[in-house]
Amino acid sequence: MPVKEFGPQEGMLLDLESGEYYGLEGAALALWKRLDGHTTRDELCAHVTATFDGAGPGVDAHVDAFLRQLRSAGLLSGPGASLDAERGAGRSRARAGARPPYRAPRLHKRGNLKYLGQLD
């Protein structure tokens, strides 16, 4: 699924099959990039902790909530962190230097392009 990045903690995800598009906020973009069908939940939590400044004990619950949001939206299937469709995004890597402040990951449904006549 195509992802448009607007910054380290903001992006837009488009499900080409359904036309639905979603806002990715906070650590959601970094998590989405790690969902490859092989990365475990614990690895996702460790990645968030290593990537963002101030990510503390609540990270596990936030990651779990984000994974539930993805499943509920039909963007994640199976018991682990695997996706139904290819996303076309590479792995996120922690950058040297200052880390961005932690913001809990959130998925927000923004609309459907089919209703706007943008997709057939």
Image: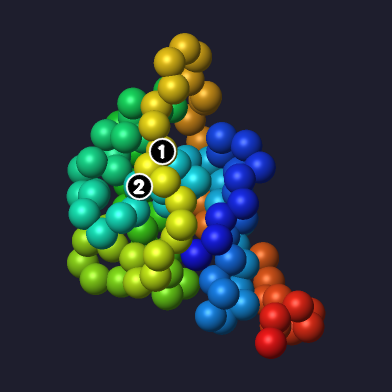
Horizontal side of residue 87 vs 15, given as left or right: left
The quadrant in which residue 115 appears is bottom right
Q: In the image, residue 80 lies at what x, y percent?
A: 22, 61
Q: Quick one: SS at disc 1?
A: loop
Q: Quick one: SS at disc 2?
A: helix
Label 1 crowding class (10 Å Cα cut-off): few <14, some 14-19, many 20+?
some
- The residue sitting at the top extreme is 97
**Of the image marks 2 and 1, the number of the one nearer the N terminus:** 2
- The residue sitting at the right extreme is 116
* Three-letter code for the amino acid on which mark 1 is drawn: Ser
* Three-letter code for the amino acid on which mark 2 is drawn: Arg
Nearer the observer, 98 or 90: 90
- Proximity of marks 2 and 1: CB atoms separated by less than 8 Å: yes
Residue positioned 51% across, 51% down in the render: 106
Nearer the observer, 64 or 10: 10
Work out which quarter of the rendered image holds the C terminus and state it.
Answer: bottom right
Query: Which residue lies under the disc numbered 2?
Result: 34
Residue positioned 45% across, 60% down in the render: 87
Query: Which residue lies under the disc numbered 1?
Result: 92
Residue 114 against residue 42 in the figure, above or below: below
| Residue 72 can be seen in this image | no
Residue positioned 47% across, 72% down in the render: 73
- Whole-angstrom CA distance, mark 2 to mark 1, is 6 Å
